[in-house]
Amino acid sequence: MKLDHATLATPHLDTIRDFLCSVAGLTIGPRPAFSFDGLWLYHDNKAVIHIIKTRTDLPPTKQSSRIDHLAFRVETAAEWDALLAKLAASTIEHRLTALPDNSELQLFTIPVPGIVIEFVTVNTASA
């Protein structure tokens, strides 16, 4: 498996977008139709940074930004099945979901409090 993306959560969507596009050379690209505001930034035709816009109705001192999670891409069905088996045999909290268009499966894990790691793979059942 390989690192797939990192997700940033911030009320300062425009500022972080401008920085990552103008300084890091990323470009804005397609994003699934999630029910929350955000954008995906691309490098070499791959969405490497996902940004989630958080609440702006809080006082400025309470509007925090954070790295929300990191994600690993699982390339094969065999790898995915092995991952599911490992998690089923463990006590690690996890949740399986899919993208809104059902094209990819997402497995969110919390190996320790405050750390979210996502595993993502193509949903072969929807192909």
Image (spheres, rainbow, N blue to C red):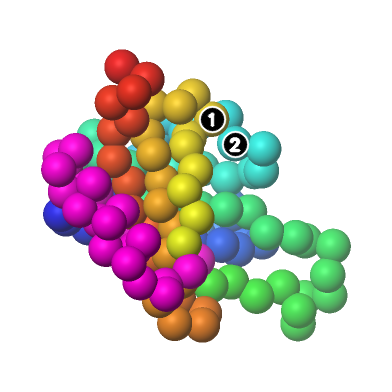
State whether residue 45 is above or below residue 92.
Answer: above
Q: How many other residues sit within 10 Å of disc 2, few (<14), some (14-19) or many (≥20)?
A: few
Please state if 103 lies on the left or on the right of 122 as rendered.
right
In the rendered image, residue 110, in percent from the top left (x then y), is placed at: 46, 71
Q: Is residue 70 visible?
A: no
User: Which contiguous range is marked in magenta?
Assistant: 68-93
**The N terminus appears in which quarter of the rendering?**
bottom left
Give the residue displayed 27% in from the left and 56% down from the top: 85
Please state if 44 lies on the left or on the right of 98 as rendered.
left
Q: In terms of depth relative to the viewer, which is nearer, 116 or 64? A: 116
Give the residue displayed 36% in from the left and 61% down from the top: 88
In the rendered image, residue 99, in percent from the top left (x then y), is placed at: 48, 35
Q: Residue 34: give its label.
A: 2
Q: Is residue 91 visible?
A: yes
Amino acid, disc 1: Pro
- Residue 42 inside the magenta-drawn segment: no
Q: In terms of depth relative to the viewer, which is nearer, 36 or 45? A: 36
The first of marks 2 and 1 along the sequence is 2
Residue 5 lies in quadrant: bottom left
Residues at discs 2 and 1 in contact (Cβ within 8 Å): yes
Q: How many numbered dots are placed on residues in this image?
A: 2
User: Can you identify the residue that label 1 sits on?
Assistant: 100
Which marked residue is nearer to the observer: mark 2 or mark 1? 1
Q: Residue furthest front?
A: 89
